[in-house]
Image (tube, grey):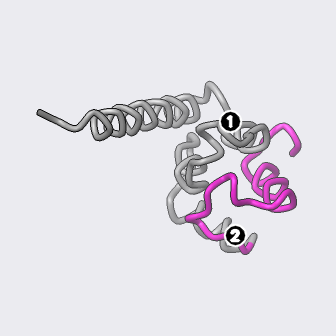
């Protein structure tokens, strides 16, 4: 017999991963741009709690090294969550990623 709280936690993690993967898929297919998603992210959104690097590397044509170098040039930690970015950092990343504000 399993613990119901554990089962709920496992189900939450699975749902969270599936939602994040769907966002990454939309970026990688070009359906949505990472910059637009980062710009419009709000607390409670899956994008808000996703690492910036994951979203930016998913963009068509993005390279891991190029993405990391660009973030370093902006003085932004590649492991930052989107929700941890300041408004200024979010504008910089959106512009660099080709979002609506670019």
Quarter holding residue 7? top left
- The quadrant of the rendering that contains the N terminus is top left
| Left or right of 25, for residue 45 | right
Q: Which residue appears at 88% of the width and 42% of the height? A: 101
Point 75% across, 70% down: residue: 74
- Say if 26 sits above or below 64 in the image: above
Image coords of residue 51 (percent x, y): 56, 54
Would you say residue 37 sits in the magenta stretch?
no
* Residue beneath disc 2: 76
Residue 66 vs 8, above or below: the answer is below
State which mark lies toward you, 2 or 1: 2
Horizontal and vertical percent position of residue 95: 82, 51
What residue did someone put label 1 on? 33
Measured as percent of width and height from the top left, residue 17 is found at 42, 37
Q: Which residues are magenta?
A: 75-102
* Along the line of sight, the residue nearer the viewer: 92 or 2: 2
Crowdedness of circle 2 by 10 Å Cα count: few (<14), some, many (20+)? some
**Marks 2 and 1, the one that precedes in the sequence:** 1
Residue 69, horizontal then vertical, whole percent = 62, 70
Label 1, residues with CA under 10 Å away: few <14, some 14-19, many ≥20: many
């Amino acid at each position: 017999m399993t613990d119901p709280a554990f089962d709920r936690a496992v189900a939450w993690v699975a749902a969270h991963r599936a939602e994040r993967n769907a966002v990454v898929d939309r970026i990688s297919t070009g359906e949505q741009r990472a910059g637009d998603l980062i710009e419009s992210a709000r607390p409670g959104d899956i994008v808000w709690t996703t690492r910036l690097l994951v979203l930016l590397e998913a963009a068509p044509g993005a390279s891991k090294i190029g993405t990391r170098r660009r973030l370093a040039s902006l003085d932004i930690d590649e492991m930052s969550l989107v929700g941890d970015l300041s408004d200024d950092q979010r504008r910089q990343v959106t512009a660099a990623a080709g979002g609506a504000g670019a």
